[in-house]
Amino acid sequence: MTKRSTPSGIQLLALSVPTWVFAGYDLARRTFLAAYLSYDLGLPIAVVGWLVILAGLAAIPAEMIAGALCDRGPGRFGPRVSWMLSGTALLVAGGVMMLCLDRTSSRPPVALALVALVVGWAICNVTHGAWALEATRDGAGRARVFGLRSLAGILGAVAFSLIGALHVGHWSPFAAILLVVSVGAPLAHAGLILLVPDRAPLARARHRGTLLEPVRLLFANRENRRLAALFALNGAHTAVTGTAYLYLVGDALALPAWGPIGVLVQSACAAIGIAVAIACGARVPPARTLQAVFWVNLLLALALTALPAGRPAALILWTALFGLVSAVDFMALRLLLGERLDLAARTGGMTARAAAHYAGFHLPFNLCGALATGLLFAGYRLLGLDPATPHGTEHSYMAAQLMPAACAALLMATSIRMLWSPAAKGPNTPPGKSSPIGSIFTQAEQL
């Protein structure tokens, strides 16, 4: 397949703006959703846990179907256009339903609104990711595409965090952010459709195994299996740290007013971190970047256990350091994913295309994120943390601070262990004895 030139400036902008909007959705769901259900809708912690798990799991079948069929969509307007339009419609419908909820709403409408919102976003996310993966096959060009997408996402997180910190009118941070997302998504996706060519091949014949193509990619070879495991660990870590933050600030540290401000600081620092990662991207292989970020996250998880209550300066310092690396790991994983797609295209050994790659490797990310969230809320319930009850919890440190810190430390230690041995072996390991991640390291430095 011929190498594609880097997209023009206006096309790079059109590829990046949807990520700006996605950042609002992601911030609302991962950081503010649980707190919104607990504090604003007054739902018991057990119900909140099930709803947050539902939100995580609902994305999985949607991404699988979109990833398997998006490459084979109707060719009249482009294979991906119809998927983007349908996903946008669901996202907006779910957002409007969520905005209509209050403390008198029963649980089924809450669940239905969440599912519509999450499924719509999942379809749009896979479609947009496939669009970006196929925008160019030039290594430097792809670094610009995904680097600018990541930067747009971080800038979006800063903007939406500011909305949350300002407490617009009587709106909660979650509702205020969701309102902007529901309006901005159709505009951003229209720009993508109009300005960036859909480079997916025209419709191919479907076969019985079409829906399983994303799953097969995860087990196609040792390198893919190990990269899928890294996505899984990253998904669990992202879910735990994002969901636990406002409970940590409000219940363990007794600084509830500083929660949205901390989210804003984290997003602003993430913009700095991702800008540095983009600048160093040409010189530092993504696997080495991952290893550095994992070590920083491990140290921050250990430091979290000693964070003092009632000290906003200590909270903001920890939050700023965490924010600097909070988006770099996911960017590096996506760069490795792009390299796997390029290798598959060159060898001709796989028929699955960009959408299947994108959805396949996000499957373990989302699945393990949902499972980790379930374990987190099970721990909250076991230790008695429930903001909807008058007594709150007698073990706020154990539930809201020590438990998520221990989970994050365990996940990062496991991730480091997966990267450490191959790094020690290096590319000179004798044939037949190389480890899976060693192969990824070698390919990352050669591509």
Image (spheres, rainbow, N blue to C red):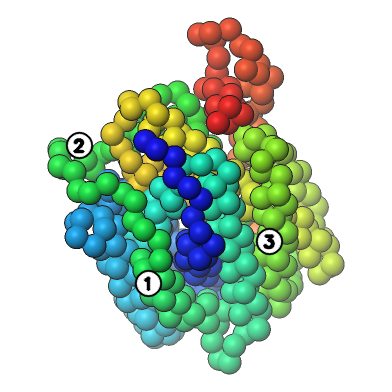
Q: Label 3 belongs to which residue?
A: 271
Residue type, label 3: Ala
Cα gap from disc 3 to disc 1, whole angstroms: 26 Å
Going from the N terminus, do you reach mark 3 or mark 1 first? 1
Give the secondary structure at mark 1.
helix
Residue shown at 37% from the left, 44% from the top = 354
Label 3 crowd bin: few (<14), some (14–19), many (20+), radius 10 Å: many
Residue shown at 78% from the left, 49% from the top = 303
Visible residue check, residue 15: yes
Residue type, label 2: Gly
Q: Depth check: 395 or 84 in front?
A: 84
Give the secondary structure at mark 2.
loop
Cα gap from disc 2 to disc 1, whole angstroms: 32 Å
Where is residue 203 shown, x and y percent of the image?
20, 48
Left or right: where 182 falls relative to 432:
left
Give the secondary structure at mark 3.
helix
Q: Label 2 belongs to which residue?
A: 209
| Whether label 2 touches label 1, CB < 8 Å | no
Q: Label 1 belongs to which residue?
A: 190
Residue shown at 49% from the left, 80% from the top = 180
Name the quadrant of the C terminus. top right
Left or right: where 291 falls relative to 184:
right
Visible residue check, residue 60: no
Residue type, label 1: Ala
* The furthest residue to the bottom: 169
Eye-nearest disc, 3 or 1: 1
Where is residue 39 shown, x and y percent of the image?
55, 77
Where is residue 274 shown, x and y percent of the image?
67, 54
